[in-house]
Image (tube, rainbow, N blue to C red):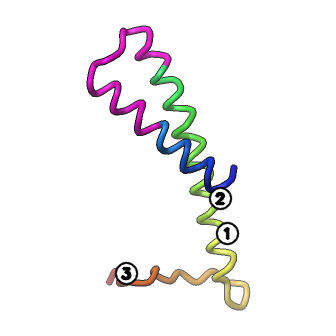
Amino acid sequence: MSKEKFEEALERLEEIVRRMEAGEMTLEESLKAFEEGIKISRLCTKKLDEADRRVELLLREEGEPVARPFAGEERES
């Protein structure tokens, strides 16, 4: 999934949540939307996990992963 598709999936998930919270759907529509939301959530989580693993691989030094904070973040004590 490309970045654009990830962003689109996340936007769709946010839309589903807004509609469900607003009570705009019947029970059947809510169940279908919930099912779709779960699928999207799992897909987004998988993509984020893959990105995290890629970052760890890029930061490896001497074969060992090195955790570094992103710019602007401080390390936890």
Q: Give the residue at mark 1.
A: 54
The magenta segment is: 13-32
Q: Does the magenta stretch include residue 45?
A: no
Q: Give the residue at mark 2.
A: 50
Point out residue 49 in the picture as x, y percentages from the top left corner: 59, 57
- Labels 2 & 1 near each other (Cβ < 8 A): yes
- Labels 3 & 2 near each other (Cβ < 8 A): no
x 46%, y 37%: residue: 13
Point out residue 41 in the picture as x, y percentages from the top left corner: 51, 40
Q: Give the residue at mark 3.
A: 73
Point out residue 27 in the picture as x, y percentages from the top left corner: 37, 9
x 40%, y 17%: residue: 30
Q: How far apart are marks 1 and 3 (CA)?
A: 19 Å
Q: How far apart are marks 3 and 2 (CA)?
A: 21 Å
Q: What element carries label 3?
A: loop
* Vertical comparison of 47 with 13: above or below: below
- In the image: residue 2, left or right of residue 74: right
The single residue placed furthest to the left in the displayed view is 22
Mark closer to the chain start, 3 or 2: 2
Mark closer to the chain start, 1 or 3: 1
Q: How far apart are marks 2 and 1 (CA)?
A: 6 Å
**Label 2 Cα neighbours within 10 Å, binned few <14 / some 14-19 / many ≥20:** few
